[in-house]
């Protein structure tokens, strides 16, 4: 890691309708990091990822993406709004990952086809090329989405609960892919709920409970005490909440 | 809570409906006529003694009219309602009911010998009886008698007006017959959009052909259009005529395919605006026969 | 036998014109209908056809039976309603269907009000209900132009449109084409409705847009298949409808749309993809 920040959070507060879902986040994600975003339900993990993507405007503070265009970020959202009954094949769906190259008009020609088949092969989908997406299982469909992400060839990859409702074999294969991305120097941030997975594969963790609880190497940050504190801090919106006066809440930090 | 609210609303509505409509008195007798042609006839006979309100105005389509609340109010204040009858005003019953009309309904076509026509294996009555001046005289007489019955004091005026009006019709009849006589027999054919001239044709010796049926509501079929085109071509009919109440596009198409001219606009179911070529009943005939003569005599 | 099919068109100019008009409409409207159906927006076509009506009525009031005025008015009204509905859906709690319903109903009421205030009692629908038997040069030109523009535009936005239909999130994340595509598609819907209403009247236009597309669902799975089948179905329905109107003396536009409806019912029974008949006859399952 070269220490250059890929993402800088400046006292960031994100939320809906003036109620913060996550507030006063300050810190940096270095380029090439493999960061796990952990926290209980309602901790603001999805909100933070949406904020990075630009889908949500900050209520306060800002996010600095080091000049990266948001269309160059690969994003796998948690609520997949995909219409699975739509008549589109695996090949078509995956090849959309090349959007930045082909735009609305250029075709998947001889030059580009190998990239697509390469991605399909990496995810074990070569036998499924012509199947419509509606005929796939949950795990197979998740592979399709990852194949598409792979093709996007993005510097920054955001994954929101990528392993939810997916079989273990697929999870194992997807983790191999994530580690490959990490080796290629891409920045990967994944929101996860399985602590053991995080401990096994993710060197850095950001523990979130509507505010930063702990941020640093997984080994030292993901302690039972921190996890307990995170559990306490998470709560629903307070409809009677006062205006927030704090600048930075107490948190545990360790940089590498 | 919601149920009581709904109940209260229902009661308020019922109360509103029960409020009676008041009528007001005036110098002139207020009467209503269903459409412009009839309205003009009532004005001609009633003169200054009546205040006529007409529902379907100039260039309006009396077959498919939508009455407004203003119409209902006007009707409720009228003493007599003059309608054509013979199935023209399908919307009239609704208007009568909604206005709570308590006056007299006079069917102007009473005593007319109605034409029947066969349309798609159904026999229906042709309502356009006013297109024959002989019938027009019957209309005028009916109007006169109804006005006298409602306003006996005006008997002399009504009789004088009616006589003048009917004399005018007699003169016009002579004009029309003379004009038709000048047309070569094989050219005495009217082609126009709907079958409004049945009475005119049988009274004055002409023939009509139309792609739509009696009412403006019906849509033409390809067979209808094909038949007319074939006939025009076969019989070398020189002109087709537009109407002021229907869409001319179909007729334009027929004209362009057959080479027939557009012979002008005929007034069938409605008068023109008062300053137009057919602002009253007799002018309507004058306009129509002029158009026909010009196109078909040469 | 063949000459029964050909004679009416050989003998009469108006029949040929009607066929040309229907051909143009069959090329441009059904593909739009395919996308409407795939996006679960089938009823939107009907709502939009009501929304353009008042615009066309105002055009008529201002300029008489002018094709240009009525088309322009209808187009403006349709686009306005579509834009406003979309805007409201994006910036308030209302979803697209509620916001569209609100706007098209207002539009319709406004149109009826304006026409009746003017006191002209010519039945609105009747005036705007064109007939395919009376397509003059201008009407054919309009329908043809709309067909060309619509087909070309659809080809250009095909890819983002497909993406917008089945994965709008992804499209938003990689491209700025999401909103423009949505908007262009709505413009195409309105344009085709305008083109169609000259020939078939507003009520029937939605029929030629949607019925063939829905029919195609029983014969094809992929989008190109759906498009091809829907265009064919529309054209054959138009052809048979015209012939029925000629030989059986029935009004033309209902004949065409009912024919399209008959195709739909038949397809529902015997279509290869999920036809009821095949569902009732269990077939052995495949190897893999």
Image (cartoon, grey):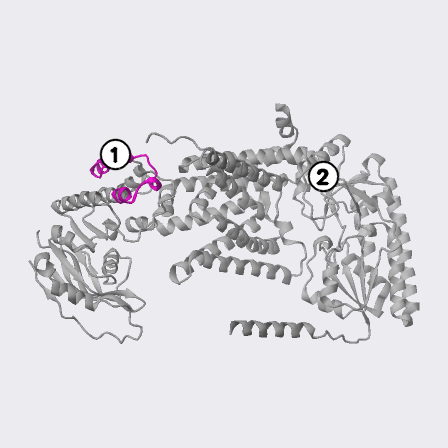
- Camera-near label (2 vs 1) is 1
Instruction: Return the mark for residue A179.
Output: none
Q: Mark 2 lies on which chain?
A: B
Residue C137 visible in the shown view: no
Instruction: Pick the residue in front: A134 or C22.
Output: A134
Instruction: Pick the residue in front: C267 or B187.
Output: C267
Q: Name the residue under label 1.
A: A126
Question: x, y percentage for residue C232?
Answer: 50, 33
* Pointers 2 and 1 in contact (C-beta within 8 Å): no
Question: x, y percentage for residue C210?
Answer: 50, 43
Instruction: Pick the residue in front: C184 or C101.
Output: C101
Residue B225 in the image: above or below residue C73: above
The residue sitting at 67% across, 32% down in the picture is: C247
Q: Name the residue under label 2.
A: B261
Whether the magenta-drawn stretch holds residue B118 is answered as: no
Please give the range of residues in magenta: A114-143
The residue sitting at 11% across, 45% down in the picture is: A183
Task: Name the quadrant containing residue C22.
Answer: top right
Q: In this view, does A212 lie to the left or right of B94?
A: left
Instruction: Pick the residue in front: A6 or A237.
Output: A237
Q: Which chain carries label 1?
A: A
| Residue neighbourhood size for the residue with mark 2, other residues' Cα within 10 Å, grouped as few (<14), some (14–19), many (≥20) | some
Disc 2 versus disc 1: distance between alpha carbons? 71 Å
């Amino acid at each position: 890691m070269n220490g250059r920040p890929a993402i800088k959070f400046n006292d960031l507060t994100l939320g809906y309708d003036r109620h913060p879902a996550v507030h006063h986040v300050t810190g940096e994600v270095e380029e090439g990091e493999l960061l796990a975003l952990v926290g209980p339900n309602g901790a603001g993990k999805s909100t933070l990822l949406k904020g990075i993507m630009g889908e949500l405007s900050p209520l306060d503070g800002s996010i600095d993406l080091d000049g990266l265009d948001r269309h160059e970020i690969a994003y796998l959202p948690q609520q997949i709004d995909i219409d699975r009954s739509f008549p589109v094949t695996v090949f078509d769906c995956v090849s959309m990952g090349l959007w930045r190259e082909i735009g609305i008009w250029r075709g998947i020609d001889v030059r580009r086809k190998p990239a697509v088949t390469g991605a399909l092969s990496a995810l074990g989908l070569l036998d499924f090329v012509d199947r419509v997406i509606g005929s796939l299982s949950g795990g197979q469909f998740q592979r399709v989405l990852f194949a598409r992400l792979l093709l996007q060839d993005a510097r920054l990859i955001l994954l929101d609960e990528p392993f939810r409702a997916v079989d273990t074999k697929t999870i194992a294969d997807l983790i191999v892919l994530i580690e490959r991305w990490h080796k290629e120097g891409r920045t990967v941030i994944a929101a996860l709920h399985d602590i053991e997975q995080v401990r096994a594969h993710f060197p850095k963790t950001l523990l979130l409970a509507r505010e930063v609880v702990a941020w640093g190497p997984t080994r030292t940050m993901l302690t039972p005490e921190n996890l307990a504190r995170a559990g306490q801090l998470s709560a629903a919106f307070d409809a009677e909440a006062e205006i927030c006066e704090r600048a930075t809440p107490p948190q545990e930090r360790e940089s590498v | 809570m919601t149920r009581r609210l709904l109940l209260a609303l229902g009661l308020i509505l019922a109360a509103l409906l029960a409020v009676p409509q008041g009528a007001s008195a005036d110098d002139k007798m207020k009467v209503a006529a269903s459409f412009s042609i009839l309205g003009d006839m009532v004005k001609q006979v009633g003169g200054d003694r009546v205040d006529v309100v007409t529902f379907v105005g100039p260039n309006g389509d009396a077959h498919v009219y939508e009455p407004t609340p203003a119409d209902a109010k006007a009707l409720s204040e009228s003493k007599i309602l003059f309608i054509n009858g013979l199935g023209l005003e399908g919307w009239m019953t609704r208007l009568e009911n909604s206005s709570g009309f308590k006056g007299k309904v006079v069917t102007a076509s009473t005593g007319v010998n109605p034409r029947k026509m066969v349309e798609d294996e159904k026999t229906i009555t042709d309502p356009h009886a006013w297109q024959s001046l002989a019938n027009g005289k019957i209309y005028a007489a009916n109007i006169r008698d109804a006005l006298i019955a409602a306003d006996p004091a005006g008997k002399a005026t009504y009789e004088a007006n009616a006589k003048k009006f009917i004399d005018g019709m007699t003169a016009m009849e002579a004009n029309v017959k003379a004009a038709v006589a000048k047309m070569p027999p094989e050219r005495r054919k009217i082609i126009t959009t709907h079958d409004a001239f049945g009475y005119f044709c049988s009274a004055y010796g002409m023939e009509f052909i139309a792609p739509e049926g009696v009412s403006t509501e019906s849509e033409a079929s390809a067979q209808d259009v094909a038949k007319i085109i074939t006939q025009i071509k076969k019989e070398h009919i020189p002109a087709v005529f537009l109407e002021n109440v229907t869409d001319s596009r179909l007729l334009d198409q027929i004209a362009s395919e057959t080479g027939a001219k557009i012979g002008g606009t005929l007034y069938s179911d409605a008068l023109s605006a008062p300053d137009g070529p057919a602002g009253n009943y007799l002018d309507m005939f004058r306009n129509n026969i002029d158009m026909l003569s010009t196109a078909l005599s040469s | 036998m063949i000459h029964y099919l050909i004679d009416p068109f050989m003998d009469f100019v108006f029949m040929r014109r009607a066929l040309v008009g229907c051909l143009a409409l069959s090329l441009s409207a059904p593909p739009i209908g395919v996308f409407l159906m795939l996006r679960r927006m089938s009823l939107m076509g009907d709502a939009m056809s009501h929304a353009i009506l008042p615009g066309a009525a105002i055009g008529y009031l201002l300029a008489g039976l002018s094709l240009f005025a009525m088309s322009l008015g209808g187009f403006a009204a349709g686009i306005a309603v579509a834009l406003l509905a979309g805007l409201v859906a994006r910036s308030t709690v209302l979803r697209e269907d509620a916001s569209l319903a609100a706007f098209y109903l207002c539009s319709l009421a406004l149109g009826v009000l304006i026409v009746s205030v003017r006191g002209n009692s010519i039945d609105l629908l009747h005036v705007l209900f064109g007939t395919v038997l009376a397509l003059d040069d201008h009407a054919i030109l309009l329908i043809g132009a709309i067909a060309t523009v619509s087909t070309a535009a659809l080809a250009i936005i095909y890819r983002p449109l497909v993406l917008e239909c089945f994965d709008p999130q992804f499209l938003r994340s990689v491209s700025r084409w999401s909103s423009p595509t949505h908007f262009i598609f709505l413009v195409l819907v309105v344009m085709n409705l305008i083109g169609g209403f000259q020939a078939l009247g507003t009520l029937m236009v939605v029929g030629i847009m949607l019925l063939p597309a829905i029919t195609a669902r029983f014969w094809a799975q992929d989008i190109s298949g759906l498009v091809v089948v829907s265009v064919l179905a529309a054209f054959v329905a138009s052809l048979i409808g015209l012939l029925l109107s000629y030989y059986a003396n029935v009004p033309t536009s209902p004949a065409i749309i009912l024919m399209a409806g008959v195709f739909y019912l038949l397809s529902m029974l015997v279509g290869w993809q999920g036809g009821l008949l095949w569902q009732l006859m269990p077939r052995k399952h495949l190897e893999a």
